[in-house]
Amino acid sequence: MKRLFILLLIACSAIATIHAQQRAKGQQTTPIHVKTLFNDIIKTWGSPSDEVFSINKNPNTNLIESSVRITYFVANNSEWTDENDKSLNLKDISEAFKKDEPTSYQLLHLSPGTNESFSLRAVDGNGKDKSYLVRGMNKEEMWLLCTKNAENPQLRDAYAIKWSLSDDERKILGAIYQITSLRPDIYEKELASSKKTFKIVGRVDENIKDSLYNIYIAESGEELANIGDDDYVACVPVINKRFEWQTELDKPMAGRLRCIFPDGSLCSAWINLDFVPGETYNITVHNGYYDGDQDYERRVGRYSGKSLLNERQKRGNDDVVILDDVVIDTIPTDPRIIPLKDESKPTPEQQELLKIQVGAKLMTIKTGMETIKATYKSLEPYWNKELLRNEQNYRSDCQTERDVRR
């Protein structure tokens, strides 16, 4: 009896599992009827020249994180078109959306005359939010269907169509929206609870144990490049050859770590990195160089494809001036580079140094020429007046001399 009871339990579990799998499989079905309808409309009456199209993929996985396709169309109304002519039956739109309703988690229909506008919100993996106005006039009719993305259930596939009739009702003027993005409900939930601690843990050598460290934060790498020396958010002391600093963040930020020497002077170089919520960055600072946290960089920062820093900032060398194709560092020259001798072959490092020095001299010459041009331009009106005055005086003297001769 006991054995029979166990067999019955196993059989019931198996049936329940199969049913759940079939149900889940059914929920993942894409809206075939709506997609087929959209493709037919776009192919027949779409306007490719006015189409809005963008796609954003994860560089590591090549999977879509967000995409937008908006296509405008002008179709013949089937109620005013001969049977032999290609036309759009508006009833086909409502039927397609109703048939695909089981695949969706949201279905919306707005009829003409309804005083309600509607926008689709699109959020990508970086948290960037953008809204697309789908229905803005009460004479427009709209259908909307939202489903979970088949490859990533955290993404939402939104399918929407709106249209209105021309004055003679013979033409259907509309637009089709196909937008894939992070599901807004997931994004808002994550945002509400995403404020996490970012922490820096540092160690220093014996000979720099009396130093301090300034911490800088900016929204982007561009803002970080323009940040002032005194615009730091924290000044962290070194205690027992260690320093620590932490802050609460709800999104990644661009950050900088810069040493203050015991004499109070700022180091001419610095360390740029992405400040990521929920992460800890470990660093060991030596005299003249440092050991960064490579695991951190691979895990969340510079190699993820979402870094807020440009390539030069990642190398800690973003204090630059661009002169044509020459990049001139305004950071002082490294005194460890041995001056080039006439009989020696320059090393790549020395060649780069010479390139920088030549570029700096060119910049000085160019700046001097611009200053001379500006000075000349500012004095030109006065010179013209003086030349005119001298010419008038000369003509007056000549006229006086002719009068005396007479």
Image (cartoon, rainbow, N blue to C red):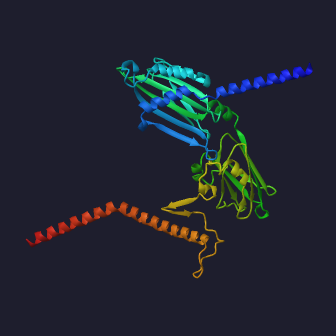
Q: Find the residue positioned furthest to the right.
A: 1
Q: Position of residue 198 (x, y in %)?
A: 72, 45
Q: In which quadrant of the rendered image does the N terminus lie? A: top right
Relative height, residue 37 to residue 129 (above, below): above
Relative height, residue 146 to residue 279 (above, below): above
Tell me if residue 228 can be seen. yes
Residue depicted at 42% across the width and 31% down the height: 44
Q: In which quadrant of the rendered image does the C terminus lie? A: bottom left
Q: Find the residue positioned furthest to the left.
A: 406
Is residue 46 shown left or right of residue 2?
left
Q: Position of residue 347 (x, y in %)?
A: 61, 73
Instruction: Return the residue nearer the eye: 51 or 37.
Output: 37
Instruction: State how many labels appear.
Output: 0
Relative height, residue 134 to residue 251 (above, below): above
Tell me if residue 119 can be seen. no
Q: Position of residue 120 (x, y in %)?
A: 54, 30
Residue depicted at 64% across the width and 68% down the height: 334
Instruction: Return the residue nearer the eye: 291 or 34.
Output: 34
Q: Determine the image quadrant of residue 174.
A: top left
Instruction: Return the residue nearer the eye: 274 or 100.
Output: 100
Q: Position of residue 180 (x, y in %)?
A: 57, 34
Is residue 21 shown left or right of residue 55?
right
Instruction: Return the residue nearer the eye: 401 or 294.
Output: 294
Relative height, residue 123 to residue 104 (above, below): below
Residue depicted at 21% across the width and 64% down the height: 392
Is residue 134 shown left or right of residue 195?
left
